[in-house]
Amino acid sequence: MPLFNYTRDRPNPPNNPSSDVPSMKINNNSIDDLIDVDHFSFNEANGGLHRQMQIVNQAAIPVGLIAGEGTLYTKAASGASQLFYSRDASGIEIQMTSTGITPQSITPTYTPANANPGTLTYVTFLPGNTVLITGTIVGASGTQQVTFGFNITAIISINITRLNTAPNPTNEGSFHEVLSLASTPGGFTFKNYNKGAGIQSGFSVMWQLFGVL
C-alpha cells in the first residue's frame, strides 16, 4: 500500500525557513501523490474528480458511526472483498455485492435434456448476498429439472408462468408445481400439468428464482 511521508507544522515560524525547505518539499510532493491515488491530481484534466475508489477491507463494521451519515466500506466475505453499507449509527450491515456471482447469461443443466438449447437464463446478485435468476424453457418435459453451476444456500421462492407460444399444446389449460429444491449445486424440479391434472410435456414456461447464496 502507498505510504506518503509528511511532517506536520512546516513551516515552523521559530525555524530558519531554509531549514524547513526539505520537509516542505516532501510535504508538497506527498500531497500531489496522495491525491493522485484515486483522483485526478494537479495539472490534470478533471482535477479533483475520482478516477476510481479503492477501499481497504475492514476486519469488522467501522467504529464511530454517526447518525445522519451513511458509511460505505469493504470487508472480506467468503474469501473475497465485498462492499457493505450501514445507515446512520444503526450498526446494521447491508452487503451490497455478492460472492462468486457475476451478472451474466448462464446455461443451466436440464434433466431430461430436452429444453431448447437457445433458452436464455440470466443470473444477478441483489443486496443482502441474495441471488435472482430468471429464464425461459421452450417445450419443457412433464417433469423438468433445472440445475445451476453454483451452490444456493436457500431458495426462497420460485415463480413459473406458462408462455402462450408454440410448441405449447393448443388450447390446453395448465398449472405448474415445484417438486423439490436443491442447494449443492442449486436447482429445482417442477411438473407441468394440463387442465385435467395430467402430466403434460411441451409447455413453454418463464421462471424466476430468488434465493440466498
Image (cartoon, grey):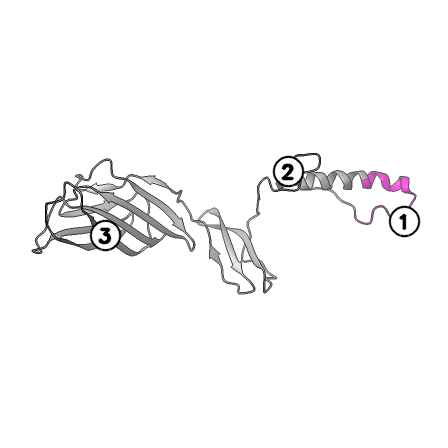
Q: Earlier in the sequence, mark 1 or mark 3?
A: 1
- Compare residues 10 and 207 and report the one nearer the observer: 207
As helix, strand or loop, the secondary structure at mark 3 comes to strand
Specify the quadrant that holds the N terminus. top right
The residue segment tinted magenta is 8-24
Q: Amino acid at mark 1?
A: Pro
Magenta-colored stretch includes residue 16: yes
Whether residue 1 is visible to the viewer of this picture, yes or no, is no
Q: Is residue 107 above or below residue 175?
A: above
Counting from the top left corner in percent of width and height, residue 93 is at 49, 59
Magenta-colored stretch includes residue 14: yes
Q: Is disc 1 in contact with disc 2, using a CB cutoff of under 8 Å?
A: no
Say which mark, if any, is on residue 13. 1
Q: Nearer the viewer, mark 2 or mark 3?
A: 2
Counting from the top left corner in percent of width and height, residue 39 is at 63, 41
Residue at which label 3 appears? 160
As measured in the structure, the alpha-carbon distance from the residue carrying label 1 to the one carrying label 3 is 76 Å
Q: Quadrant of residue 109?
A: top left
Classify mark 2: residues with Cα within 10 Å, few (<14), some (14-19) or many (20+).
few
Q: Nearer the viewer, mark 1 or mark 3?
A: 3
As measured in the structure, the alpha-carbon distance from the residue carrying label 2 to the one carrying label 3 is 49 Å
Residue at which label 2 appears? 46
Q: Earlier in the sequence, mark 1 or mark 2?
A: 1
Counting from the top left corner in percent of width and height, residue 6 is at 76, 44
Whether residue 82 is visible to the viewer of this picture, yes or no, is yes
Q: Residue at x 43, y 54 (%)?
A: 127
Q: Amino acid at mark 2?
A: Asn
Q: Residue at x 78, y 46 (%)?
A: 7
Q: Is residue 62 above or below residue 35?
A: below
- Could you tell whether 173 is left or right of 206 in the image? left
As helix, strand or loop, the secondary structure at mark 1 comes to loop
